[in-house]
Amino acid sequence: MASDNLNELSTLKAGDALTPMKLPPISRTSLALYAGASGDHNPMHIDIDFARAAGLDDVFAHGMLSAGYVGRLVTDWAGADRLRSLTLRFIGITNVHDVPHLSGKVAERFVDGGEMRLRIDVECANQNGEVKVSGQAVVALG
C-alpha cells in the first residue's frame, strides 16, 4: 500500500491485514553491518567463538535488528510521517539464517487528540512461524 494513499488507509477496519513482508535470511554479513551501523558490537552477535564459549551453538541477531524490520513493515505501509508509536516485546532469539516474516493486523480504529488512528498488532516471526518480536504500532490516518 502506498504511503501517500490516505483513502486506502482510511477504509481499514479491525481484522484487516497489512501486506506481509518476507526478508532475506539473516546472514553473518547482515549482523556485522548492523553492528557497525548501530554501534552494538556485543560479541554474542558477531563472534562465534565467544558465543560457543557461552554455551551457544552460534551467534544470534540483535533484537533491535528485528525491531527495525518491524518498523520498516509499518513505515513502508503507512509512511513514516504517520507513525505515532511503536511498542515491541522481544520474545525469542533470531538465529543466523532465520528468514524474517513480518506481519500486521489492524486491532482497532480510535480517535486521539482529534486525530483518527489505527492500532496495528505487529510481529516478526521466522520461517517456522516462531514469533521473535511482537507488539503494536499506532498510525495516524490524517
Image: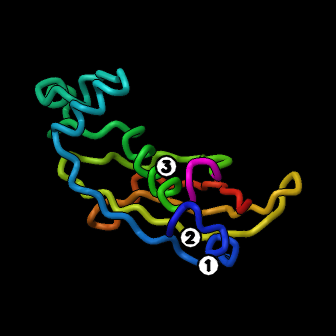
Classify residue 31 as left or right of residue 112: left
Q: Residues within 10 Å of mark 2 (few under 14, many from 20)?
A: many
Q: Tell me, yes or no, whether the highlighted magenta stretch contains residue 90.
A: no
Say which amino acid is labelled 2: Lys
Look at the picture and state if 58 lies above or below 110. Answer: above
Which residue is pictured at 84% across the width and 55% down the height? Answer: 112
Q: Residue 7: percent from the left, percent from the top?
A: 66, 73
- Label 3 sits on a secondary structure element that is helix
Say which amino acid is labelled 3: Gly
Asked whether 30 or 133 is in front, the reply is 30
Classify residue 70 as left or right of residue 139: left
Which residue is pictured at 52% across the width and 60% down the height? Answer: 122
Q: Residues within 10 Å of mark 1 (few under 14, many from 20)?
A: few
Range shown magenta: 78-82
Q: CA distance from mark 3 to mark 1?
A: 20 Å
Classify residue 49 as left or right of residue 70: left
Q: Residues within 10 Å of mark 3 (few under 14, many from 20)?
A: many
Q: Which residue is mark 3?
A: 71
- Label 2 sits on a secondary structure element that is strand
Mark 2 touches mark 1? (CB < 8 Å): yes
Q: Residue 60: percent from the left, percent from the top?
A: 25, 39
Q: Which residue is mark 1?
A: 15
Image quarter in which the C terminus is found? bottom right
Which residue is pictured at 59% across the width and 78% down the height? Answer: 16
Name the disc covering residue 105, or none.
Answer: 2
